[in-house]
Image (cartoon, rainbow, N blue to C red):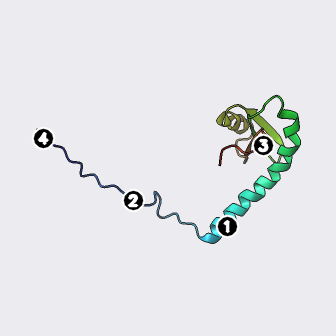
Amino acid sequence: MNQVYSTRLARRGRIFPEIVLSPEEKAKKQAEIQAFRQRCRPIFERLRPQLIENYYNWFIVIEPDTEEYFIDRDRMAALLKALDKHPEALFYTFRLNETGVCGRV
């Protein structure tokens, strides 16, 4: 019986090692994301009481500049609805529940 040995080496490391962010760049990106979230959160808080009764645990995608929102049971479907209307915009996704959190910790 012939045995086949694998000589494939496991490659370890970063996928794109040339892309390395400094701690300052990481902090700046996190601050930008947090500021964007803070723009979207009041819109979500205003809409949540109206929508939570009929759409509990659905996803809501908010575009803060126009204050438009898109809801669907599936997160990607809601995002695709938003992208159809505003292809160049940034969006933030919440879940229509008591906390607005999309996942589990």
Tell me which amino acid carries mark 2. Arg
- The CA span between labels 2 and 1 is 26 Å
Residue at 18% over, 44% down:
4
Would residue 42 appear left or right of 27 to someone viewing this image?
right
Q: Rounded to the nearest whole Å, what is the CA distance between mark 4 and mark 2?
A: 30 Å
The residue that label 2 is drawn on is 12
Identify the residue shown where x is 74% and y is 35%: 57
Residues at badges 2 and 3 in contact (C-beta under 8 Å)?
Answer: no
Q: Is residue 38 above or below residue 77?
A: below
Whole-number angstrom distance, CA of label 2 to CA of label 3: 38 Å
- Mark nearer the viewer, 4 or 3: 4
Coordinates of residue 2 in the picture (x, y in percent): 12, 40
Looking at the image, is mark 2 or mark 3 earlier in the sequence? 2
Secondary structure beneath label 4: loop
Residue sitting at x 72%, y 32%: 72
Q: Amino acid at mark 4?
A: Asn
Q: Which mark is residue 27?
A: 1
Disc 3: which residue: 62
Q: Mark 4 or 2 closer to N-term?
A: 4
CA–CA distance between discs 1 and 3?
24 Å
